[in-house]
Amino acid sequence: MKKKVLSMFLSVAMAATILVGCGNSNTPASNTPASSSGSEASSDAGSADGSFHFEIVSKGFQHQYWQAVLKGAEQKASELGDTMNFVGPNSESDIAPQVQMLDAAIAANPDAIGLAALDTSACLDAITAAQNAGIPIVGFDSGVPNAPEGAIVANAATDNYAAGALAALETWQLIKDKVAPGTRIGVLSQDATAESIVNRGLGFVDRMADLIVSADLTVNVEGNDRFVNDTIAEKTEGADVIIEVLVPSSVTSELSTIDCQTLLNKADTICIYGSNQHSAEAMVTADENIGKFGSAVVGVGFDSGAVIKAAVADGTFAGAITQAPVAMGEKLVELLHAAASGEAVSDVDTGCQWYTAENMNDAEISQNLYD
């Protein structure tokens, strides 16, 4: 929340960059295209009919989420008459292979590059090379945080703060008759460092606090220091309602499960929100031997996946927020096309959706629910 004229000197410099790799890894990365739309592209900038070729480097194909992004990108590329090569490493921990895929993408001399960086610092050399070569880079998903100024022309990503706020608004409709002096609302966050995760939590906390105050009740945020310090909610000792945010000391399902059980075992807890797939799945595990979700406690998740979808479908969770990965793929290609055309581009919020057992099979929703 853009094209290039390559000289022989830059071509030589680029070849050197590829041999070294911006991650300084000696292990070759697989750059087999996950998808190509249309015919093979030439190395010329665009073509006579105004079509372009894009190289898109995702975070991987460990999750179906990326297949949904790919679907949207394919649809939009076909519509615009563009071609693309969509790749990603085997998992989201494979930083060096992704770096090598980015090197290969630059060597392909595309009209623009889409990048969801696993580690911006590891890709700095390649990003700089692309910038020097006049190849615009559009970030997507988490984008390319802290990239060199001007290297990333736009980002297509979920507004995570707004998504968290939407979760709070939908949750409020479910719990407003239960919210009263002496009640507690729990928030589970995977960590307190990743901006996307923190923003999903803060969006929920801030909006929920505002809704509680609008009901003429006082509220206080407790728990993790990052959330306590960063919330815009006023600090109120002895408040009517407590919003408690728990973050595990390390990102493990076991520790997140324990955090959820801690909240479930508090008699005043009326609702728990898990701000990503990790936290929401830990909620399901935590409740297996307690059985409060769907009855005494309202459970709300974020993201999709088989476990969360099943929890929503059977009533364990009242609902969940999903990002819109198909729309993200579409918006990414739109930005790439505009940037390659020389148009000014800016960040795009790719949106999110609230889904429940009643609407999760609707076509508009189901295309964004990945396993």
Image (spheres, grey):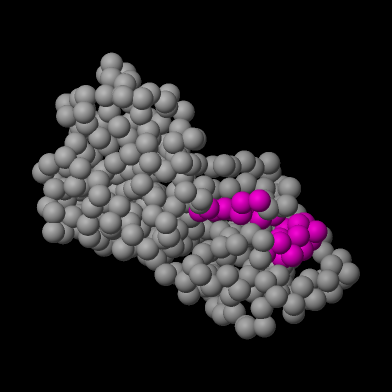
x, y percent for residue 327: 44, 50
Picture layout, residue 56 above or below residue 226? below
Left or right position of 88 against 68: right
What residue is at 19 percent from the left and 47 percent from the top? 265
x, y percent for residue 117: 58, 60
x, y percent for residue 348: 54, 42
Find the residue positioned furthest to the bottom.
Answer: 27
The answer to whether residue 340 is magenta is no
Find the residue positioned furthest to the right.
Answer: 9
The answer to whether residue 137 is magenta is yes
Q: Give the range drawn in magenta.
A: 123-146
Find the residue positioned furthest to the front.
Answer: 238
What residue is at 46 percent from the left and 28 percent from the top? 232
What residue is at 73 percent from the left and 48 percent from the top? 150
User: Quarter-wise, where is residue 123 in the image?
Assistant: bottom right
Q: Viewer-proximal residue, 371 or 332?
A: 371
Is residue 303 something one can see in this rendering? Answer: no
What residue is at 36 percent from the left and 29 percent from the top? 220
